[in-house]
Image (cartoon, grey):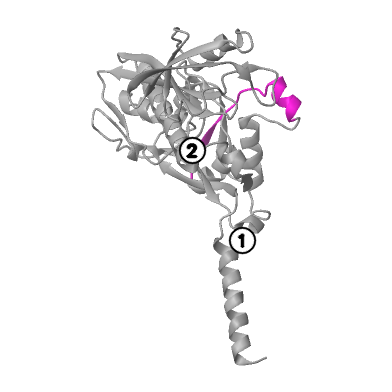
């Protein structure tokens, strides 16, 4: 082989190697991320939490796959390969980031409300409406509503939760006329449409995914700057951090306390995804305990996935697999987590 041919083969090999390492694929990798102090993001009455120990926000790291990482994912522990369609749905990457920020905004509001209420501080919660998170292709509101719009009423009726809105829609006949009132860039607008058959179901609806938008008011100044951090799963830990700052009680006893779960206005803790990865991250960060939602698996979930298990069961399974000394604590409400911290020594 001549020197010229060798150089061309070498160049081709380099190009192929670079492509193997950096070419983006329509897949994403979900893997254990980091665990950080929540106190660095929040203040109460303009003061930060300076006490020893920390409540920890635990991440799932999401990276777009390349051919190299795609292959590696099959041998990387606690790593899931997710298609672009399953990750983003019909949303663009930009809209997906918006959606995650709306979830975080809702998590912050609910955490403020529950923490202030449990601390017996004066607080009010006003339900504004429902964020539009996505619109299906078959929806008659496609290209009318946009991600981030806020639906305030349907057929002239205002509801106090997205669940009540969905329940009302379920009571309507197929192809019923619908008039939505909504906010777009702060301006009130209306849109006409009708209920349509939802894909892969026998139900009718309007083909819009929604999330609650609320406003919490109090004489106690509570600020949470979580810009760049998305999703609703930090709700429980945010509530614990705020409650400790508001009351001045050293509930974590100077230790690292991690956990996950959404926070609802009634104090209940909701399930989240990727809890196995969060257990791994929290253990590596040196957390002593990990709060995990312990809600029962519904019959419908069992029907579609016989192997489905509660967040707590999956967390326990992961903890055993990685041989961590971190204690997994089941919770269904904020009060469960609070009672545990008040009655157990963390060590």
For residue 139, side relative to residue 239 (left or right) = right
User: How many numbered badges does the structure rendering display?
Assistant: 2
Label 2 environment density (alpha carbons within 10 Å; few <14, some 14–19, many ≥20):
some
Question: From this viewpoint, is residue 142 visible?
Answer: yes
Q: Which residue is identified by label 2?
A: 96
Position of residue 129 relative to residue 236, above or below, is above
Q: Is residue 38 magenta?
A: no
Q: Nearer the viewer, residue 301 or 219?
A: 301
Q: Is residue 303 magenta?
A: yes
Label 1 or label 2, whichever lies nearer to me, is 2
x 57%, y 12%: residue: 169
x 46%, y 27%: residue: 341
Q: Quadrant of the N terminus?
A: bottom right
Nearer-N-terminus badge (1/2): 1
Q: Rounded to the nearest whole Å, what is the CA distance between mark 1 and mark 2?
A: 25 Å
Label 1 environment density (alpha carbons within 10 Å; few <14, some 14–19, many ≥20):
some
The x and y percentages for residue 296 are: 65, 22
For residue 146, side relative to residue 80 (left or right) = left
For residue 219, side relative to residue 263 (left or right) = left
- At mark 1, the secondary structure is helix
x 28%, y 35%: residue: 48
Q: Which residue is identified by label 1?
A: 68
- Residue numbers of the magenta segment: 286-305
Position of residue 21 relative to residue 163, above or below, is below
The x and y percentages for residue 225 are: 33, 36
- At mark 2, the secondary structure is helix
x 64%, y 58%: residue: 72
The x and y percentages for residue 20 are: 60, 64
Q: Nearer the viewer, residue 320 or 18?
A: 18
């Amino acid at each position: 082989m001549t020197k010229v041919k060798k150089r061309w083969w070498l160049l081709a090999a380099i190009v192929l190697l670079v492509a193997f390492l950096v070419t983006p694929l329509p897949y994403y990798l979900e893997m254990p991320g980091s665990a950080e102090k929540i106190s660095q993001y929040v203040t109460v009455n303009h003061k930060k939490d300076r006490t020893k120990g920390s409540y920890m926000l635990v991440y799932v790291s999401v990276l777009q796959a390349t051919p190299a990482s795609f292959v590696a994912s099959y041998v990387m522990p606690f790593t899931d390969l997710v298609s672009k369609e399953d990750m983003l749905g019909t949303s663009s990457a930009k809209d997906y980031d918006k959606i995650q920020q709306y979830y975080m905004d809702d998590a912050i509001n609910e955490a403020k409300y529950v923490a202030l209420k449990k601390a017996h501080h004066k607080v009010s919660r006003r339900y504004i409406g429902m964020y539009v998170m996505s619109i299906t292709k078959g929806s008659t509101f496609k290209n009318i509503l946009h991600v981030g719009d806020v639906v305030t009423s349907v057929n002239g009726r205002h509801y106090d939760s997205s669940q009540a809105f969905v329940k009302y829609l379920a009571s309507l006949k197929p192809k019923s006329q619908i008039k939505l009132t909504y906010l777009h860039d702060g301006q009130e607008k209306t849109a006409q449409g009708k209920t349509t058959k939802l894909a892969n179901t026998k139900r009718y609806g309007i083909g819009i995914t929604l999330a609650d938008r609320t406003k919490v008011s109090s004489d106690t100044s509570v600020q949470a700057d979580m810009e760049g951090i998305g999703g609703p799963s930090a709700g429980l830990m945010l509530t614990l951090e705020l409650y400790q700052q508001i009351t001045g009680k050293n509930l974590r006893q100077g230790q690292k306390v991690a956990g996950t779960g959404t926070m609802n206005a009634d104090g209940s803790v909701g399930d989240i995804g990727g809890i196995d990865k969060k257990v791994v991250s929290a253990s590596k960060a040196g957390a002593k305990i990990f709060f995990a939602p312990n809600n029962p698996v519904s019959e419908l979930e069992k029907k579609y996935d016989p192997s489905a298990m509660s967040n707590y069961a999956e967390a326990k399974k992961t903890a055993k697999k990685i041989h961590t000394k971190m204690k997994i604590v089941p919770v269904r409400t904020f009060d469960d987590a609070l009672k545990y911290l008040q009655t157990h020594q963390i060590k």
